[in-house]
Image (cartoon, rainbow, N blue to C red):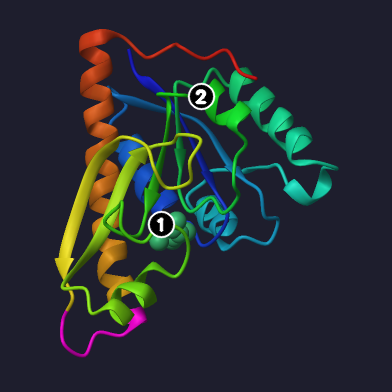
Amino acid sequence: MSLRIAIIYSGRGSNMLTLLDHIIAHPEKFELATLVCNIPTALGIERAQAKGFATHLIAHKDFASRDAFETALNAHLLEKNVDVVCLAGFMRLLTDRFVGAWAGRMINIHPSLLPHYKGLHTHERALADGALKHGCTVHYVVAEMDAGPIIVQRETDVLPGDTPDSLAARVLELEHEAYIEALNQIADKSKKNGPNTNASGP
Ligand code: GRF
């Protein structure tokens, strides 16, 4: 049985496209349940469209509250029978209620070697600290931001002369590898144990 994957993104969508390609290439393991974006002008929407995939837009600005936005998002995910939610450059904080409802079934990519550099501007902060290593982390999403059990990390040396942009570009390539590896691990685990079904939605 293939896992039904939702990908949720906010921007240019390079992680989203990498996941999408991997899902398409492995129908024995994965099925795209839905692509969701919360920003109407996100570049990823066009990029997915160019591959023939429509994005379901749920613009958070259209909702009066965070709860109302999440209620709509959750209803969509339930309607699409989603097994695993992949946050791929999704730039909104989620409430404990939503996170709890998808516990063990929602994963995120973060551009640092967690627990170092939670939050924004990770490349700048790693360079400012003189860090020797930097990288990315795929982890399960828990109530605390950029925390939660780690699934995969990939690291790179910080090179003399690195700028935030050069480091970001190198880490982004690692992000794509790490996300695929994490998804494969989840598929293997679910093949053994059955999909994690501990959520019914908030
Ligand atoms: C990535 O660096 C991701 O780790 C971070 O936001 C960026 C999104 O990039 N959360 P993209 O939209 O996947 O290209």
Q: Indicate the secondary structure of the residue bearing disc 2.
A: loop
Magenta: main secondary structure:
loop
Q: Is residue 122 magenta?
A: no
Quadrant including the N terminus: top left
188 w.r.t. 137: above or below: above
Kindly identify the residue that appears in the image at 34 percent across and 26 percent down.
30
Asked which quadrant contains residue 95, the reply is top right
Residue pictured at 27% horizontal, 65% vertical: 171
Q: Mark 2 sits on what residue?
A: 102
Residue 74 position in % (x across, y down): 64, 26
Numbered label attached to residue 174: none
- Looking at numbered disc 1 in the image, what kind of residue is underneath it? Lys
Above or below — where is 68 with respect to 92? above
Compared with residue 36, is residue 177 higher up or lower down, i.e. above or below?
below
Label tally: 2
Residue 71 visible: yes
x then y, percent, for residue 195: 35, 13
Residue 118 — which label? 1
Q: Is residue 154 left or right of residue 102?
A: left
